[in-house]
Image (cartoon, coloured by chain):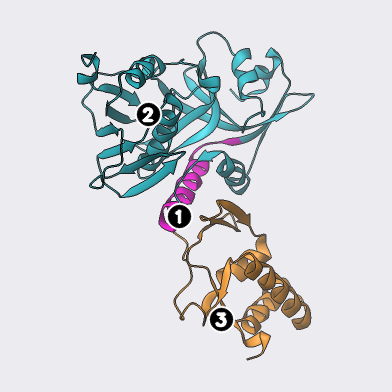
Chain colours: A orange, B cyan
Amino acid sequence: MSAASTVWQRNPVLAWREITGSAVIISPAESVMHELNGTGSVVWRMLDGQTTVEQIAARLCTEFDVSEETALQDTSSLLEELAALKLILPAQAAGGAKGATAP
Amino acid sequence: MLRNLRRPLELSIGTARLQISFSQEELYRRALIRYQGFETSDDPGFFIRLLDSHEVSAPSDFHYEWEGASLRCGDREAVFSGVRHEYALDSLLRVFLSWTLLPKPGFLLHAATIVRNGRAFVFAGRSGAGKSTLAALAPAGAVMTDEISLLCAEGGEWRAYSTPFWGEFRAAGKHRHAPLAGIFQLVQAPQNRAERISAAEAVRMLLPNVLFFSKEPEANRRLLQTVSAAVEGVACHRFEFRRDASLWEALPA
């Protein structure tokens, strides 16, 4: 499976909420708060355990008027960062369960 | 010696009516002093038992441990075990309140609250932000609390309540409350200025100041929901202030 066809999902142990376009995420175990900007929040919303990185990048192309290459690079870079923080998991590793849902 | 222990301490903190039963005379005596302004004769809604040792059958909807002491609470009752001094009792009471407030919705906040014209101005910030300074500059009788405020929504209106958790472990204050005028993030500066902030900024400002102890994802989701509701229902500001009495002039009416 190529990186572009990888599917990620939000870590189900997180609490998160979208507030005026920004995703605010709490990691309860560490009591740490994270916040994503507008673009990051669009990506975050799509991390549903079903949408591929390629599909997320395609959405960014249409919403933010950027090239496919740039969108894919930015998305991959953000996902790497989120994965390092354990805010997202590869969908397969979580047994295909749905990610955390906003209340 | 056991005479006083037969009468539990009954307190009113925020919207909670607590009945606390003690097992140690000295701790009971200290608690009477510490929480004197919050005694009530209202019917209790929560029953807290202090035990010397841990009880296996204690309710356990929520469990928390702090320096050898522990709390287990259920729907209307809680057991505090291994509480050796008033600092531990204070800590477990704060944890207990933060848990019971969540469904109201409500929460405890590191904040000083000052009452002006019958409305509560809540100034949030951790140690060193200026809460004590601001409280010292407030007119006599206007300080609701100088360290930890309790915010709770009732009938769609957010109100601030005093708490007995004053800075430097002083026994001060009494049970009182007022509708919220606004929440202000304290920023010491050479000038006074109150600037309205967005809901997202307000959540970012408030969350690190909220007292919350559960690591349960669902409880944290509810906390986020509660804080979001608060910032949508109450005006939030960044408040730059000078350390003198002129700061009051910069507050919105």
In the image: residue B62, left or right of residue B214: left
Residue A51, numbered circle: 3
- Residue B132, compared with residue A59, is above or below; it is above
Tag 1 or tag 2, which sits nearer the N-term? 2
Q: Using a 10 Å C-alpha cutoff, classify the residue at mark 2 as few (fewer than 14 neighbours), some (14 to 19) or many (20 or more).
A: many
Chain holding disc 1: B
**Is residue B89 in view?**
yes
Callout 3: SS: strand
Report the number of discs: 3
Q: Amino acid at mark 3?
A: Thr
> Could you tell me the amino acid type at mark 2?
Gly
Work out how far the residue at label 3 is from the one at label 1, CA to CA, in angstroms. Answer: 24 Å
Write the residue at 30% across / 19% down: B25
Give me the disc on residue B54.
Answer: none
Which chain does tag 3 point to?
A: A
| Front tag of 3 and 2 | 2
Question: The residue tagged with tag 2: helix, strand or loop?
Answer: loop
Label 2 belongs to which residue?
B14
Question: What range of the chain is rendered magenta?
Answer: B217-236
- Give the percent coordinates (x, y) of residue B122: 54, 28
The percent position of residue B66, horizontal first and vertical second, equals 45, 40
Q: Residue at x 24, y 15 (%)?
A: B4
